[in-house]
Amino acid sequence: MRRRTTLTMGPAALLALQAAHRLPIAYAQGSGRTFRFGAPAEPVKLDPADTTDAESARITEQIFDNLVMFEGSTTNLRPGLATDWAVSPDGLTYFFNLRSGVTFHDGTPFNAEAVKWNFDRWMNPDNPWRGGGTFEYWTDVAGFNEVIRSVDVVDANTVQINLNEPQGTLLLNLALFAFAIASPTALAADPEGFARRPVGTGAFRFVEWVPGDRVVMDRNEAYWGEQAKVDRVVVRAIPDNAARFQVLRSGSIDMMEGANPDDVPTAQRDRSLQVILRPPLNVGYINMNLRQRPFDDVRVRQAMAAAINRPAIVEALYGGTGTVASQLIPPSVMGWNPDVAGPRYDPDRARQLLAEAGLPGGFTTDFWVMPVSRPYFPSPQPIAEAIVSDLGRVGIRAALRRETDWGTYLQRRNQLEYPVWMLGWTGDTGDPDNFLYTFFGPSAPDNSWDNDAVKGLLRQAQRSPNMEERQRIYQLVNSVVEAEVPRIPIAHTTPPLIARANVRGYNANPTSTEYYNTVSVG
Amino acid sequence: MVSFILRRLLEAVPVLIGVSIVVFLFLRLIPGDPAIALLGERASEQNVQRLREQMGLNQPLHVQYWRFVRGLAQGDVGRSIRTTRPVMAEAGSRFPATVELTAAALTLALLTGVGAGTLSATWRGSFIDHAARVLSLAGISIPIFWLGLVLIWLFAVQLPWLPPDGRLSAEMRYSPITNFVFVDALLQRRGDLALDALRHVILPALALSTVPMAIIARMTRAALLEVLRADYVRTARAKGLPERAVTLRHAMKNAALPVVTIVGLQVGILLSGAILTETIFSWPGVGRWIFESILNRDFPVVQGMSLVIAVIFVSVNLVVDVLYAALDPRIRVR
């Protein structure tokens, strides 16, 4: 081994290596007090309100707190900066009692004024402290621009949120990373620079961001909640999946996200590693343009669904992290209907349905493949090939078409330029509204299913503060979707996180809202 | 010599203008909308439009180009669309990282390449020659991506000798002055910092050096073989000079000419290789940053950094020309 090393390396490198070998190997073992996380990319901006990417959220979640927060590995809510809350019977007014004695990392006191200051910044596009931000989560994800009218300070520790219309998902939305409370002093001092020097009330305070490399955070000794078990968190940006896995194996980081499907079984066999599966909150589906023939005929859509061997695809192409989807929301989400079994693989039935629709010889169409992989379609190309081959067996001759650019793909599907295409969704809040309203609501970008009854039901469920009523409505919608097949659900996945065996207390949350104060590195 | 340098500098101006136009146009010709790339699959059409408006992407091309050039004249290459930070501020810490990596790789490539080429030429046809030639063939053929992963697997996972990622250990803290870690370590007299940085640069520099090493080795061998056949070398030998003096003092200087040219061109290869190397070794440099910015359609970053790289490339070629002129006086006369 040594001889071959000598041959394939320059003498200078060899000398350096031998010198390095005699050094103490500090990097190979964690200090025990630092939690080092390997992320697929570096954050974009650390101003939570103006952020849409998962990498920024991963960090702001440690630095900031919300009024209400997700509990451990669930989408249940627990008190955050608000100790308790109440809603008026008409669902139009929310009262929040705030935690007293909390200060931001810069010493600014947290109180009702600070909460109102943050809401005013989010709400008003002319607010001077927005730092040029566009605040997508406020408008596009939570829809708060239409729902929240104003925020009033009742007393130093109570705020009142006034709504234009009830929103059943308001509390879950408030737990999203984007609605974390930031220090008004720090923001007012430098609205643009804040995204590089964030100040919140969270379990960790921001220390430094080395561009392209790492973000460092230290424990907030004055944290109001559970004290962090590690002194420091370092989030490293390691872009290549395979390299990130090797870095984890070398012990240079303690945990990582975004493994290649092939590396998961390797990690499961390795006793120095552990695989933590995040509960599924996504769905991959096949969408069709229902405004075009032949997809305007429900029998054709049912034939498509019956032709695809979904269990075989999940078995072969998801690396053990997928489950066949029976409906367009995952089982952990309220409104999942246990009576909806989902399309059954039955090529004979598919042929029969096509014949009934007047297409006994099948038909020809284009099938568009996603140019990037997403958790719900970890390897889009082979999955698409398998689907196209299944369709071919019942006479649906689909030509595989590929867009090279993701932005173009999204743009063209928004304009319904494709007859059949693949896409999916990763949930934000764990609320069914976040799935079904996004798919079939009035402003859904790629929806060609003009079903006014369903739109009305979704609107009704969105406004209702009554959870049982909402659950009934969503279950009903899921059974209508099963019958009408506006989209064909394929799979849900449990995105794997891989950690060193000595990492304890990591709560993998379906919404990816994960707080590191519970993590210890033994 | 001064007029020679001045003439070369003047010739660089049209090159840089050309680069700015080509980069500007190519970015806008490739499909993909920066607003959608930034906002992602959940963005509403309204927000996409608002962002396009804000970024000036709805303006005609010549207006956008003029804005870019006007900014350049004021020393401003623009702000990143993604992070909204000035491109130059962001480059401030990434650029030194790439310079350190490429400098280390070039040094490694020069030492091993010239060494292997010289050995190979002096012992032509021997086992050493064959070994060196196989090595340089491998250097050219092995993809950096694969080699990088193998190096990490071997030297960081199996034999945990060297760190596999980044520029410094996660635990290492320091306050940058120049952002060149080695310079800062010297300024702050931090031996631990220099050592940590050195250990981190070895694997990526090794991966990055393979292609230039191989090219330099082959070029050195070929040039030296040719020179060793020349009359004046025979004369030197006939004078009774020892073989070592003949090779190192007489032959090497003339063989250096083509090698210097090639080394200058390697800077370009190194910078493009840096994209892959920086991705595999999570090196916080400009190569990876430009690559990610192309994927995100972050026009100002790509435009600004392409220009900076063009300036570097032109300067390196200028240095090569000057070196060339110093080595061979005939070039100045022409």
Image (cartoon, coloured by chain):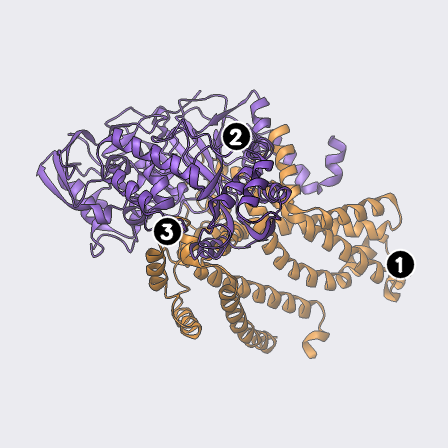
Chain colours: A purple, B orange
Residue drawn 61% across the image and 75% down it: B1
Label 2: chain letter? A
Q: Secondary structure at mark 1?
A: helix
- Residue pictured at 58% horizontal, 64% vertical: B313
Residue A321: mark:
2
The amino acid pointed to by label 1 is Arg
Label 3 is placed on what type of residue? Ala
**Label placed on residue B43:** 3
- Labels 1 and 2 positioned on one and the same chain: no
Q: Are marks 3 and 1 on the same chain?
A: yes
Residue type for callout 2: Thr
Q: Residues within 10 Å of mark 3 (few under 14, many from 20)?
A: many
- Left or right relative to B244: residue A164: left
- Percent across and percent down for residue B182 are 51, 46
Callout 2 crowding tier (Cα within 10 Å): few <14, some 14–19, many ≥20: many
Mark 1 falls within which chain?
B
Q: What is the count of numbered marks?
A: 3
Q: Which image quadrant is residue A460 in?
A: top left
Q: Chain of mark 3?
A: B
Q: CA distance from mark 3 to mark 1?
A: 77 Å
Q: CA distance from mark 2 to mark 3?
A: 28 Å
Q: Nearer the viewer, mark 1 or mark 2?
A: 2
Which quarter of the rendering shows the N terminus of chain A?
top right
**Which residue is denoted by mark 1 in the rendering?**
B237
Q: Residue A9 falls in which quadrant of the image? A: top right
